[in-house]
């Protein structure tokens, strides 16, 4: 896939709309004066102290003639639980500063510090966000005016490693990460490495074909994984076009997917896993509920979109949809003088719906 500036800008704009500092990154990207941006930053509500401090520092560096990685030593000793937040801030400010056209060494310093902090990211619970941030950064370094093969390889490997080492129970994520790494290797003329990646996906995921109707495998994840299995077969087939068995496997997968209305899957990074770094559990849930309530219809395709965007499971999305219907029934029962008892998970969804109603 050729990454265009418009495609990347669309992803970043969608992401920044959801982040508390999104308007700050947007202002930096537009090249607004740091003094003006500082005033906006001071007016933002719900901005954590670490974020305020970091962004003030970046804005001060924008005004210097020359910047080096040493100017970011102040984040060397942050708590390990906060490292992933600083990785996100470094990534977003790097993209914003680059787009703003600043040429005082700040981009290079941000890029170097970003790699250093990623190497310090020890907690597996942060890998979901790191996986998606790495995907965004791979796209950033794939832009026509920003090609950097070394950093492309680095971020593709980070995305793949965090997935295969810690998310093997998400076959849809494994397929996407490993096939994409194979694509990267292929683009660098490493045909053997690419073929190995595609073969790994085939071996890991072909069991799903036999369990296509197994209710114990969640539907959205199952279909996305099958789509990536089909892609792995197709891309390995391009390397070995005379492999008849592989050709038949690819054709059967295409037929299977077409018969289940899954001819395409979401491809952009799962932005929800980045957004949730900045949000409480309830706020993140409210965002998911808002997305579900805005759906024109609830089917396998729309469920796949929600599963992918937010990094939740088919089971969770189905529960949320059921809880939304329960909320409607709850109002009817209460108006009839009947009090219903619901568990904590239902009450959290109800709270999200009421918060959205208050905002309207």
Image (spheres, rainbow, N blue to C red):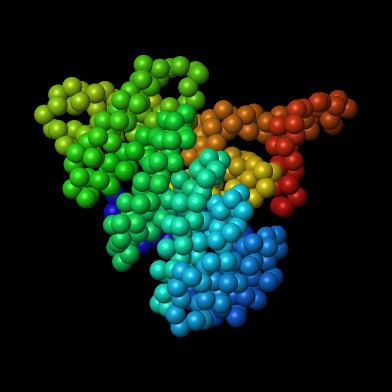
> Residue at the spot x=63%, y=33% of the render?
320
Q: Going by the picture, which residue comes out furthest to the right?
A: 337
Quadrant in which residue 250 is drawn: top left
> Residue at the spot x=44%, y=80% of the render?
66
Closest to the observer, 197 or 173: 197
Residue 11 percent across, percent down from the top left:
45, 55
> Residue at the spot x=45%, y=16% of the render?
214
Can residue 83 be seen here? The reply is yes
Residue 359 vs residue 289: left or right? right
Residue 194 percent across, percent down from the top left:
24, 40
Can residue 230 be seen here? The reply is no
Q: Is 305 situated above or below 74?
A: above
Q: Going by the picture, which residue comes out furthest to the bottom?
A: 65
Residue 350 percent across, percent down from the top left:
73, 37
Q: Going by the picture, which residue comes out furthest to the left?
A: 242
Quadrant in which residue 204 is drawn: top left
Quadrant in which residue 75 is drawn: bottom right
Closest to the observer, 321 or 277: 277
Q: Is 263 situated above or below 34?
A: above
Residue 68 percent across, percent down from the top left:
45, 73
Closest to the observer, 107 or 77: 77
């Amino acid at each position: 896939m050729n990454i265009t500036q418009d495609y990347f800008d669309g992803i970043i704009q969608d992401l920044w709309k959801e982040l508390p500092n999104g308007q700050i990154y947007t202002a930096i990207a537009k090249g607004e004066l740091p003094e003006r941006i500082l005033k906006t930053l001071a007016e933002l509500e719900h901005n954590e102290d670490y974020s305020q401090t970091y962004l003030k520092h970046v804005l001060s560096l924008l005004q210097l003639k020359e910047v080096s990685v040493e100017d970011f030593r102040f984040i060397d000793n942050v708590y390990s639980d906060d490292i992933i937040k600083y990785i996100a801030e470094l990534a977003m400010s790097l993209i914003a500063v680059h787009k703003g056209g600043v040429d005082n060494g700040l981009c290079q310093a941000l890029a170097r510090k970003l790699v250093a902090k990623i190497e310090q990211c020890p907690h597996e619970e942060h890998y979901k966000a790191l996986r998606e941030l790495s995907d965004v950064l791979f796209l950033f370094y794939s832009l026509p005016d920003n090609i950097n093969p070394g950093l492309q390889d680095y971020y593709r490997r980070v995305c793949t490693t965090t997935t295969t080492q810690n998310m093997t129970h998400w076959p849809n994520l494994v397929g996407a990460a490993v096939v994409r790494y194979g694509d990267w290797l292929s683009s660098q003329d490493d045909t053997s490495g690419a073929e190995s990646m595609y073969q790994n996906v085939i071996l890991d995921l072909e069991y799903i074909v036999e369990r296509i109707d197994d209710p114990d495998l969640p539907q959205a994840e199952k279909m996305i994984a099958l789509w990536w299995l089909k892609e792995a077969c197709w891309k390995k087939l391009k390397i070995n076009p005379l492999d008849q068995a592989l050709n038949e496997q690819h054709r059967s997968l295409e037929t299977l997917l077409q018969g289940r209305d899954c001819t395409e899957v979401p491809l952009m990074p799962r932005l929800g896993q980045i957004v949730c770094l900045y949000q409480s559990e309830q706020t993140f849930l409210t965002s998911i509920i808002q997305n579900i309530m805005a759906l024109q219809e609830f089917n396998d395709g729309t469920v796949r979109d929600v599963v992918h965007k937010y990094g939740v499971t088919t089971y969770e999305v189905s529960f949320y949809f059921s809880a939304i219907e329960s909320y409607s029934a709850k109002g009817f029962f209460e108006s009839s003088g009947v009090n219903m008892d619901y568990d904590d998970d239902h009450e959290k969804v109800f709270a999200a719906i009421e918060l959205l109603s208050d905002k309207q």
